[in-house]
Amino acid sequence: MSVFWITGIVLLLVAAGFVVFPWLVEGRKRQDTLTNTRLIRQRLLELEREEHEGLLSHQDRLETEKDLKIALLDEQDSQTQNATSARGVLLIGGLLSVVGVAVLYFQVNNVSALNNWQDAKVQLPELAERIVTQGDASVTEEDLQQFALGLRTKLTSSEDDAIGWTLLGRVYVATNRVESAMDAFERALEIEPDNLETLASYSQVLLMVNQESYLAQAKVYLNRILELDPQNTGALGMLAMAATQQGDTELAIETWQRLKTFVPKEAPIYQSIEAQIAQLEENASITTDSLAEQGPLTDVEPSAAESDDAPVLVSVTVTLDNSLAGKIPQNGFLFVYAQDASGASRMPAAVVKMPMGELPITVELSDANSVMPTLTLSQLSNVLLVAKISESGNVMKTSGDLQGTLEITLNKSKNEQYTILINEELP
């Protein structure tokens, strides 16, 4: 039985109680009043008889009769007051019942959410024009959420729209609804399994989550892209990163080498790729036993070669609001990362991850901390700096994470100093 019906029955019983209880009490009082009135009237008749028989003087009869009539009036006034009180109780009970049912209906049926859904359907064409066609930079996260709600509603009547599902997935990524984004991309791939854009978008999300099972799934999709388009440099870069993060050294070296052939030697990315290959070849020389102890390379950290070559672009000092001091997880991690502030891509351009230690702490970000060689910090202009404390060890935002943000304009000619205050707990 639903919560609505259970609560409705309870409210009905309470309302019935407001009606029945005063009625029972009033009934007893009414019966007592009738009994007393009958006795008083009977006594008046007896007084007349006693005076007629000479047992009582006329004066005594009048005085006694006066007292009895006063008592009778008191009984009638009491009955009137009780009736008024009972009506008041019934009125209050009825009003409370009506208010309770209205509140219950509003909560159970989520009327505000229903109104929001109706607004989303009406605003869908306008939001689609601003977000998809115009690329309006003034679009807020609330606009994206409204657009996602309206688009999801539209897809219920056209579930074979692969483009729609892909677009919905990208909007979910932009609003940090990663699981919903994965579901949307999977629906799109069920309709068009070889859609390159969907495969690339889904692979990017899987790489961002950076978990073993997701990395393996990303490699499958990226290999499929390269089967369909062998010169897809974006897929090559993501596959190289997935293999590196997963500890698949042989595949990582092979893929970085393939990617290097598409990059001009004078490009800064070329040097980063060479440094990554050198680091992987050095790791490959370690014995099998050492590799087993070391485990897969899952943390996003710069290699020694990269750190020496890449200039520091941003120094970030991370501090913590005193109100959150008691909420730091014992085995948590600190992430400091930079991403495009325009929201064009949610993929971090530079990430530093470390076990949680004492705050404040200063972290340096550069191209050496890039997740993908095709997306580096130096390529960005408006940058969103994020400092996050997480127990999951996952760079993606999750409920309970502690976070602080700062939006800056990147000055590539010198190392800038910034301070981020971690002052919010993610819902």
Image (cartoon, rainbow, N blue to C red):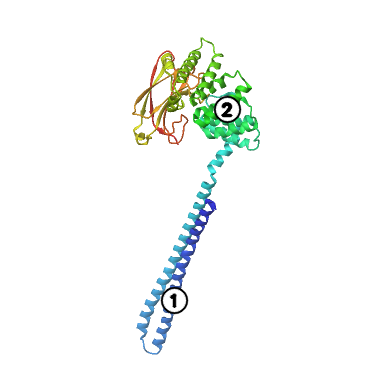
294 or 133: nearer the eye? Answer: 294
Circle nearer the viewer, 2 or 1: 2
Dot 2 crowding, Cα within 10 Å, few <14, some 14–19, many 20+: some
Q: Where is residue 84 drawn, in percent x and y?
A: 45, 63
Q: Which mark is residue 220?
A: 2
- Residue 327 on image: x %, y %: 37, 36
Res. 356 image quadrant: top left
Q: Where residue 148 appears, x then y in whole percent? A: 57, 33
Answer whether residue 5 is visible to the viewer in this image: yes
C-alpha separation, residue under disc 2 versus residue under disc 1: 92 Å
Using the rendered image of the protein, determine whether residue 130 is visible from the camera's viewpoint: no
| Mark 2 element type | helix
Q: Assign a secondary structure to mark 1.
A: helix
Classify residue 139 as left or right of residue 162.
Answer: left
Q: Give the residue at the far top of this rendering.
A: 266
Residue in view at x 54 percent, y 41 percent: 113
Q: Which of these two is toward me, 419 or 274?
A: 274
Front in this rendered view, residue 38 or 180: 180
Q: Quadrant of the C terminus?
A: top left
Instruction: Give 226 or 113, whichever is nearer the viewer.
Output: 226
Determine whether label 2 and label 1 are within 8 Å by CB: no
For disc 1, the neighbor class at 10 Å (few under 14, some 14 to 19, many from 20) is few
Q: Position of residue 305 (x, y in %)?
A: 43, 15
Precedes in sequence: disc 2 or disc 1: 1
Query: Label 1: which residue?
Result: 35
